[in-house]
Amino acid sequence: MQTPDSFIEIDGQRFEIRSAELELYHCSSPCADWNLTLLILHRSPLYLGGTVEPCPKEVADLDGARLRLELRDIDSVFQELLGVVITHCPLIDGVACAPVFFEAKQLGEGILLTAVYRFDWERALGEEGATYFEPSSARLQILGRVVALHAGGLP
């Protein structure tokens, strides 16, 4: 089986991800936290995080899971990639500022995380004089290696 590409695509601008590592915490509680470290060529590491319910006890439990993304983390990653300070507002099923979820699929030892959605910019929170795209689209497809599932908090 061919390994899928890992990338973040914002309005057709594609940013290739060299590697990604997924780490989960609080896996013995009802809701786990997760962090995803992204390595992109010629950039400092970027980070996404969020929560997942029910908590996975092993990597196989992530297959078919929905991992909720922290919107501020998406903003930070988009800002770094696009070079403009932004606060974006996902538009999902007609709902503005809806939560964004990764759909997870186990591929061998890795987890393929995908999210596709449209969004608009929160112009009132942007930089004065900044210009923004019209409602835009985002596609995230990231093959990550699970490095740990911690029963408790940070080790």
Image (spheres, helix red, strand yellow):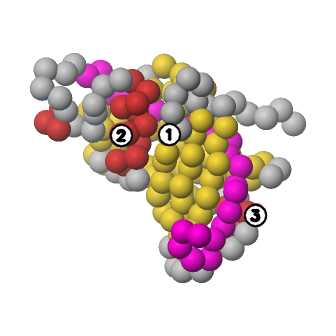
| Disc 1 from disc 2: Cα separation | 11 Å
Q: Which mark is residue 75?
A: 2
Look at the image and tell me in which quarter the N terminus lies.
top right
Instruction: Compare marks 3 and 1 and give the one earlier in the sequence.
Output: 1
Tell which tag, 1 or 2, sits nearer the viewer. Answer: 1
Q: Is residue 1 above or below residue 111?
A: above
Decide which of 82, 139 is in the foreground and name it: 82
The residues colored magenta run 132-155
Where residue 67 appears, x then y in whole percent? Answer: 53, 57
- Residue drawn at 28 percent across, 46 percent down: 96
Residue under label 3, please give it.
60
- Residue drawn at 53 percent across, 38 percent down: 45
Q: Is residue 148 above or below residue 72?
A: below
Q: Is residue 122 above or below residue 93?
A: above
Instruction: Compare marks 1 and 2 and give the one earlier in the sequence.
Output: 1
Res 125 quadrant in image? top left
Residue 136 covered by magenta stretch: yes
- Residue drawn at 54 percent across, 80 percent down: 29
Look at the image and tell me in which quarter the C terminus lies.
bottom right
Residue 16 in view in this figure: yes
Secondary structure category for the residue under label 2 = helix
Res 136 quadrant in image? top left
Secondary structure category for the residue under label 1 = strand
> What amino acid is at disc 1?
Leu
